[in-house]
Amino acid sequence: MQETKLDSNFASSADLAACRATLRDGSRSFYAASFLLPQEVCDAAVALYAFCRVADDAVDLSDERDAAVADLHERLEQIYAGRPRSIPADRAFAGVVRRYGIPRELPQALIEGFEWDAEGRRYEDLSGVYAYSARVAATVGAMMTLLMGGRSAEILSRACDLGVAMQLTNIARDVGEDARNGRIYLPLDWLREAGLDPDAWLADPVFNEAVGAAVQRLLQAADVLYERAGVGIAQLPRSCRAGIHAARFLYAEIGREVERQGLDSVSSRAVVPFTRKASLLTRILMATAVPVRSAEVVPPLAETRFLVDAVTAAPAPAHSPSAYIRPSRRSLDEQVAWVLDLFQRLEERDRERVAYMRSIAVMECTARAASAANRR
C-alpha cells in the first residue's frame, strides 16, 4: 500500500516570517520558548500567536473599540469560510484552522475576551476573573493542545488550567500598569474585604497591604493551576513537553519575582532576570524527563468547561498532528540552552534599543535648548 504524502505547508514562508517578526517584537517570552517545540508545531504556534497578538492590538490600540471588535468577528468569519483577508497572520491562522480542526468556538471566545476589555469590565469575584482568563488565555492553551494532537477532555482541561494560571500571573504583575490605564482585574470582593474601595483606589493607585494581599491570593490560585497543568503536559508528545514546561516555569517565576519585590506590582513591573531564567533549566529538564502523573482525574474549571466541550464535540482532523512532527536534531538540553541564550540576546537587544532611544531623546532636548538659546 502506497504511503500518502502529507503537505507540510499550511502557510507561505513569507507569511510565517511576518508572524515571527510580530512575536519577536511583542511576545518575547513566547517567541523564545516556541523554539523548544518541534519545528512543525513551532510554525503552527507562531501563526496562532501572531493572530492572537494582531487581534489583541487591533482592539487595544483602536480609538473605536466597538468597531474593532466587530471587524475581528468579520475577519474570523472570513477565516472559517476559507477566504482570509490579505493579512499574513489571518492567512497563516486560516491554514492552522484547516489543518488542526480548531473549532470556531475557541477563537470566538478569545474575541469575546477582547470585547470584555473594550467594555472595561470589572470582575466581582475570582470566578469572574476565571471567566475572563478562560477567554483571553485558556482559549490559546486549548488551541495549542490541538496543534500537538491532544483532544481528550483531560488534557484539554489541564491546558486550560495552564492558560488561566498564566493570565492570573499577568494580572498580578500588571496591577499598577492596568490601574494607570483605568483598568482593574483583581477580584473586587477581595479588595472590599480588606477595606479598600476599588473606585477610590483606582483614582489614586498606590500600593498598600490590601492590594498586596489580593495579589498574593491571585498568585496562590495560579500556583494551584500550574501544578495541575503538569499532569496534562505529561500526556503531550515527548518532543513537545519541554516547550510547554518552559512556558509554565517561566510564567510561574514571574509570580516569584512579584513576591520578591514585596507583592508591590503597583510601583514597578516585575521582570525575571536572565540569571533566574537560566536557573530554571534543571527544572525544565527534570519535569520533561520525569513527567508528573495523577491517579485522580480532576474536572476542568467550571469557567473553562465550555472550551473543553467545544473541542470534544468537534470532528478531529483527517490526519493526526503527529503525522507532521519530525524529531528534533538537537538533544533536549541543547534545545533548552539554545532558548536561554536567545532570551539573553533578546534582552541585550532591548537594552541597546532603550539606550539608543535615550540618546535620541537627549540629542533632541539638547537641540531644543540650543534653538531656544539662539532665539534669545
Image (cartoon, rainbow, N blue to C red):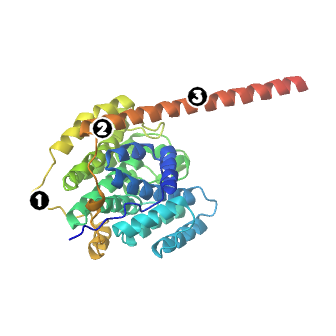
Residue 109 at least partly seen: yes
Give SS at disc 3.
Answer: helix
Tag 2–tag 3 contact (CB < 8 Å): no
> What amino acid does circle 3 point to?
Ala
First in residue order: circle 2 vs circle 1: 1
- Would you identify the image quadrant in which residue 210 lies? top left
Q: Badge 1 local density, few (<14 within 10 Å), some, or many (20+)?
A: few
Give SS at disc 1.
Answer: loop
Which residue extends farthest right? 376
Q: Nearer the viewer, residue 104 or 270?
A: 104
Q: Which residue is mark 3?
A: 355
Q: Nearer the viewer, residue 374 or 2?
A: 2
> What amino acid does circle 1 point to?
Glu
* x, y percent for residue 220: 28, 47
Give SS at disc 2.
Answer: helix
Q: Is residue 25 above or below residue 182?
A: above
Numbered disc in front, either 1 or 3: 3
Numbered disc in front, either 2 or 3: 2
* x, y percent for residue 248: 30, 46
State which quarter of the image contains the N terminus.
bottom left
Q: Residue at x 34, y 70 (%)?
A: 101
Which dot marks residue 296? 1
Q: CA distance from mark 2 to mark 1?
A: 31 Å
Q: CA distance from mark 2 to mark 3?
A: 29 Å
Which dot marks residue 336? 2
Q: Is residue 248 above or below residue 13?
A: above
State which quarter of the image contains the C terminus.
top right
> What amino acid does circle 2 point to?
Val
